[in-house]
Image (spheres, grey):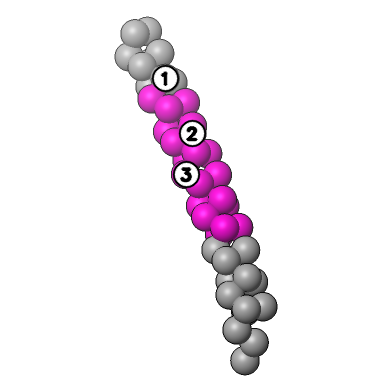
Amino acid sequence: MEEYVDKINSFGLDLSIVRTSNFVIHDLRRLFLQLHLKYRSKFPP
């Protein structure tokens, strides 16, 4: 029974890590887009 609980706990931890990294990646992409748009408006081709 202990082992089973440990597996569930580690699975929950994995999920939260995945969720956090997805959130961070999403945030970075949004930041990159904002910078890209600012850069393009400053220096039009």
- Asked whether the beta carbons under mark 1 and mark 3 sit within 8 Å of each other, the answer is no
Rendered view: 11 above or below 28: above
Residue drawn at point x = 36 percent, y = 16 percent? 6
> CA gap, disc 2 to disc 3?
10 Å
User: Where is residue 18 shown, x and y percent of the image?
Assistant: 47, 40
Q: Residues within 10 Å of mark 1 (few under 14, many from 20)?
A: few
Residue drawn at point x = 32 percent, y = 14 percent? 3
Q: Residues within 10 Å of mark 3 (few under 14, many from 20)?
A: few
The kind of residue tagged 3 is Ser
Element on which disc 2 rests: helix
> CA gap, disc 2 to disc 1?
10 Å
> CA gap, disc 1 to disc 3?
18 Å
Q: Is residue 44 left or right of residue 32?
A: right
Residue drawn at point x = 62 percent, y = 91 percent? 45
The kind of residue tagged 2 is Leu
Asked whether 9 or 4 is in front, the reply is 9
The kind of residue tagged 1 is Asn
Q: Is residue 41 magenta?
A: no
Asked whether 2 or 26 is in front, the reply is 26
Residue marked by disc 3: 21
The magenta region covers 10-31
Residue marked by disc 1: 9
Rendered view: 22 above or below 8: below
Mark drawn on residue 15: 2
User: Where is residue 40 shown, x and y percent of the image?
Assistant: 62, 79
Which residue is the extreme one toward the top? 1
Element on which disc 3 rests: helix
Asked whether 27 or 22 is in front, the reply is 27
Asked whether 26 or 44 is in front, the reply is 44
